[in-house]
Amino acid sequence: MSEQSRSSEPIFSDFADDPDMQELVELFAQEMPAKIEKVRSAFEAGRFDDLRRLAHQLKGAAGGYGFGVVGDAAGRLEEHLATSAAGSAGSIEQIKKDVQALLDLCRNVRARG
C-alpha cells in the first residue's frame, strides 16, 4: 500500500463499537477541524511552544478516545519539538514533516463508518 493511499483511509476509534464511548468519540471527531486549524496556525506562525502544548494535548486526548495512531503522531511531534535545536533548518524540516503527518491523520479521524 502506498503512503498516499494509506493517508486517505478513515481512522476509526478503538471504541467505535462501545456504546458508552460513542458520544465522546463523536464529539472528539467533530472537534477535529478546530484542532487541525490550531496546529496549522501555530506551526505557520512559528509559535513552537503553543505547537508543543497542542501536540501534548492531542497525544493524550487521541489516545484516550481510541485513536492511538493519532496520539502516536502527536507524541512524535511533541518529542521533536522538545529536542530540536531552535531554528535549525534540519529541525524545522523535521517538525514540518511531523506536523503534516499529524494533520493528515487528523483529517481522517471518523467516529464510525
Image (spheres, rainbow, N blue to C red):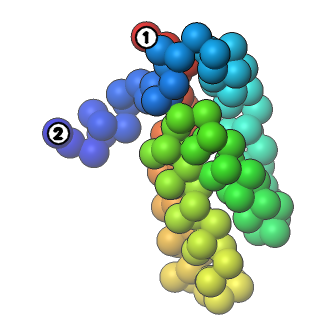
Q: Position of residue 62 (x, y in %)?
A: 61, 41
Marks 1 & 2, CB-CB < 8 Å contact: no
Lower position in the chain sequence, tag 1 or tag 2 = 2
**Left or right: 91 with respect to 87?**
left
Around disc 2, counting alpha carbons within 10 Å, would you say few (fewer than 14), some (14 to 19), or many (20 or more)? few
Q: Which residue is mark 1?
A: 113
Q: Residue furthest left?
A: 1
Tag 2: residue type?
Met
Q: Nearer the viewer, mark 1 or mark 2?
A: 1
Residue drawn at x 60%, y 72% as measured from the top left: 79
Under mark 1, the amino acid is: Gly
Which disc number belongs to residue 1? 2
Whether residue 28 is situated above or below residue 48 in the rendered picture = above
Residue 25's spot in the image, x, y percent? 63, 22
User: Which corner quadrant of the image does residue 45 belong to?
Assistant: bottom right
Looking at the picture, does residue 69 appear above or below residue 79? above
Q: Report the quarter where the C terminus lies.
A: top left
- What residue is drawn where x is 69% and y is 14%? 23
